[in-house]
């Protein structure tokens, strides 16, 4: 079984939660693999002026999660297709285990 990658978040804006005093993403969000200088869809982090949020997981910025998605306006569709919209706790995708010859 392949190891599932854990994606962090890069976003075009940020806001600070007043209760917890934590930076959270805002605006357009992209999936980002830590240690890389670009998003999953290929945007350069520095040239695109995207802020890194290594403490926020990809599943937390999806609108249906309700986590850090309060001020997220747009989820990059290319990043969502690679990183997966459903998150790590979702049921695994169907896979054929015994294909016909």
Image (cartoon, grey):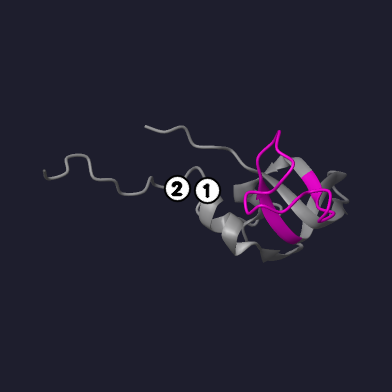
Q: Which residues are magenta?
A: 28-52
The image quarter in which residue 6 lies: top right
Residue drawn at the location 17% of the way across and 40% of the way down:
98
Q: Which residue is mark 2?
A: 90
Residue drawn at the location 55% of the way across and 49% of the way down:
83
Quadrant position of the C terminus in the picture: top left
Q: Which mark is residue 87?
A: 1
Q: Nearer the viewer, residue 78 or 88?
A: 78
Q: Nearer the viewer, residue 53 or 41?
A: 41
Seen as rendered, the residue at the extreme left is 101
Residue drawn at the location 48% of the way across and 43% of the way down:
89
Task: Assess whether mark 1 and mark 2 are in contact (beta carbons under 8 angstroms).
Answer: yes
User: In the displayed structure, would residue 46 be above or below residue 36?
Assistant: below
Residue 93, given in percent of the width and then of the height, sits at 36, 48
Residue 27, given in percent of the width and then of the height, sits at 78, 63
Count every numbered label the image shows and give the total. 2
Residue 79, given in percent of the width and then of the height, sits at 60, 55
Quadrant position of the N terminus in the picture: top left
Q: In the displayed structure, does residue 85 sit left or right of residue 26?
A: left
Label 1 neighbour load within 10 Å: few <14, some 14-19, many 20+: some
Q: Nearer the viewer, residue 83 or 21?
A: 83
Spatial separation of the CA atoms under disc 2 and disc 1: 6 Å
């Amino acid at each position: 079984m392949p190891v599932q990658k854990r994606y962090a978040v890069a976003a075009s804006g940020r806001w600070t939660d007043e209760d917890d005093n934590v930076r959270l993403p805002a605006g357009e969000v992209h999936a980002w693999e830590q240690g890389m200088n670009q998003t999953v869809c290929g945007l350069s982090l520095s040239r695109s002026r995207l802020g890194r949020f290594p403490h926020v997981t990809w599943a937390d910025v999806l609108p249906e999660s309700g986590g850090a998605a309060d001020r997220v306006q747009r989820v990059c569709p290319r990043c969502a297709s690679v990183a997966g919209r459903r998150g790590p706790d979702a049921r695994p995708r169907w896979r054929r285990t015994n294909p016909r010859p």
